[in-house]
Image (cartoon, rainbow, N blue to C red):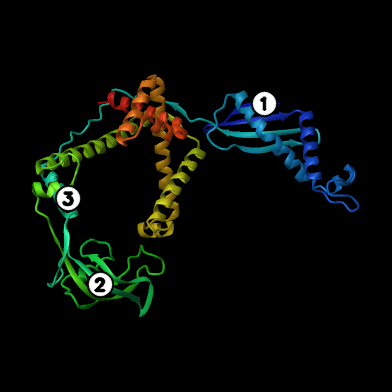
Amino acid sequence: MKFTFKELEACHTQVDVVIETEKWKAAQEASFKKLAQNVQVDGFRKGKAPEALARKHIDQGKMLDDAINSLLPEAYREALKEGKLEPFAQPKVDVTKISETELEVRFIVVTSPKVELGKYKGLELGRKEVKVTEKEVKDALEDVRKQNASLVTKDDAAEKGDTVVMDFEGSVDGVKFEGGSAQNYELELGSGSFIPGFEDQLIGVKPGEHRDVNVTFPEQYTKELAGKAALFSCDVHEVKTKKMPELNDEFVKDLAMEGIETLEALKESKKKELLESKQAKEKREYLEKLYAEIANSSKIEIPEEMIDDQAESMKKDMVNRMQQSGLTLEQYLQFTGQSEEDFMKKLKEDAKKDITNYFILEKVGEIEKLELSDADIEAEYQKLADQYSMKLEDVKKALKAQEQQFKHNLLMTRIEEELLKINK
């Protein structure tokens, strides 16, 4: 095979391949023999007709397509090897010349993004000092109390924060609609889990009381109900209020948190938790600033196909998460007031940013000659073993199929830490 390479714009390389006559003829003959096995000619058993007769019953175009497709994988592999090309997407393929004795094909190969890194160290972007206030610790402890509160019934009118147990039936213009009814439903007033205005109209209701609730569905709702006025007929069976536990050492012991048996220990634990969360958030935000600053002074050419593939992958992940929450993409777009075009445009912008950040990181690692030692990798395996109370050998066995990805992720983390270190 003969190869001619031509570099195109935006990380594309054109590869023209001339297939040897002998190879092309052999492929055609192999294709004919394969197709001839299924040819039925009167007077002959299936696949046993003479060649001249069989050829009359075989679609010439189909035979040539089959012969071409049999040669493409080898031609592509050899082209990549000859040109030392690293593909990042499926190539576009065209047949540029074809006859009984000639076959020439053209591959348009999507190659690795080109990165000319600008200034990436000594950047003074200003890191924020992270602190945890007493109020934040107090609010965190209050959340623990709320999470462990018990519900007790009361005879008085429902207040915000109370839970009502009720049957309800919704209708639009007197006609019931799917999903608009329930029995013995528990609704916390003020939780914001129902249509705006619904929960407010139940404040003041008492056990055994009937109440009609009038609401209007938001414009960003399911197509059948968007913007429509609805009536919900509600029969309240019970009103429950939260009974908050007292915040003391006894309460903390009942939580059965490992290593935490006093209120003071819980406070310290929550303070540490808040601090770590804030530090992680500040780190993410600072890294984003770093990436943006480095990208501004760099030349990074990314093929559109790579951005499209990443955006489609992100879309697939989002749709899967939506389905787990009982939402369709169409419903999500309605709720958020987006068109699918705007949704995909934003995904592509995010995809381009993610890919840019990745190749900045990879280039920094290359320039700084950052690598992981066997000891580094072993230490990370041991951390996982300790974290999940597993044997080291079992952790390695569990990650065997993703071993290369595991090591690559570790390296990327190492490079990211180095990037932070040289840009304090």
Residue corresponding to mark 2? 166
Closest to the camera, between mark 1 and mark 3, is 3
Does residue 99 appear in this view? no
* Amino acid type, residue under disc 2 in the picture: Met
Q: Is there CB contact under 8 Å for labels 1 and 3?
A: no
The mark nearer the N terminus, 1 or 2, is 1
Q: Residue at x 22, y 74 (%)?
A: 237
Q: Residue at x 22, y 37 (%)?
A: 276
Residue corresponding to mark 3? 144
**SS at mark 1 in the image:** strand
* Amino acid type, residue under disc 1 in the picture: Phe
**Label number found at residue 91:** none
| Horizontal side of residue 309 vs 119, given as left or right | right
Does residue 182 appear in this view? yes
**SS at mark 3 in the image:** helix
Q: Residue at x 29, y 36 (%)?
A: 284
